[in-house]
Amino acid sequence: MKALFSMIVAVFITAFSFAQQMEQIPLIEVEGYSQRLINPDEAVFTISLQEKAMKVADASKILNTKTQNLADALKKSKVRDYKLIADNYSVDINRIYRSGNSRDSGYVARQNLRIVTSSTNEDLQKIVDAINNSGDMSFQLAFQISEQAQRSLENELLTEALKDAEARARLIAETLNIRSIRVHHVSMDAPRPVYPTIKLRGTNAMAEQSDMLIESDEQKVDKRVYVKYTY
């Protein structure tokens, strides 16, 4: 027991001593920031399918048929570059609640589809037409910056943020007549996700409309660092 108490006291004294040493170190603390506004290089169509049937096999079959119809329509549309991704498939009991009571009425199958493309406005219209020609489907269109584009900017943004922090620290040092400074500690924020910009929601009623003008807005990618200089 005495040994444990002695160890706790030693740890406390060490931590206290370290804190005192840190307080005695003269510091200039600055924030560095960099930002780029870039055009999204990916368009993502999101389609949520849901079908009800008395048997699991029947509900699944209807979903599979719709998915295959969309795949066939995309091939016929001759879109140059796209990926059709199916995920989040599930089958649940179709439980109906009425007047405080519940009863089971077959099953409900759900499936999410995503069409990811880096194509031009002309091909986006072709994808809209393919969705509209595939059956009763609604969709959501969003524009985003691809992971590859974000990674390619990472080093540039970090370099610019560090240079910004250094410039701020040197300005403070010169203003206060501090002759020289050196880096003591560097930290940065965790990468923040760049959320897609949602531009359009549509149904197959759009098939009767003329070609749509689909444009994406610039999105912000930034980096923030925190640097402590000592002198």
Image (cartoon, grey):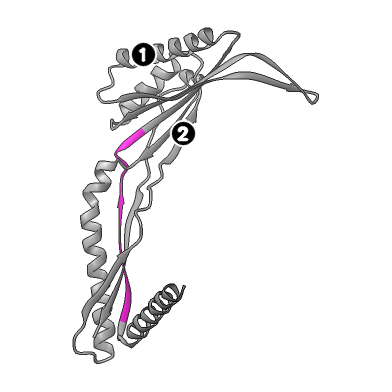
Residue 175, picture quadrant: bottom left
Q: Which quadrant of the figure has residue 128? A: top left
Q: CA distance from mark 1 to mark 2?
A: 20 Å
Q: Is residue 5 above or below residue 55?
A: below
Observer-nearest of 119 and 52: 52
Q: Is label 2 in a helix, a strand or a loop?
A: strand
Q: Nearer the viewer, residue 155 or 45?
A: 155
Along the horizontal axis of the image, is 132 left or right of 156?
right
Q: Quadrant of residue 184?
A: bottom left
- Region in magenta: 28-43
Which numbered disc, 1 or 2, marks the residue closer to the eye? 1
Residue shown at 19% from the left, 86% from the top: 180
Three-letter code, disc 2: Leu
Indicate yes or no whether the magenta region holds residue 60.
no
For label 2, the residue is: 200
Residue on which disc 1 sits? 73
Answer above or below: position of 142 versus 26: above
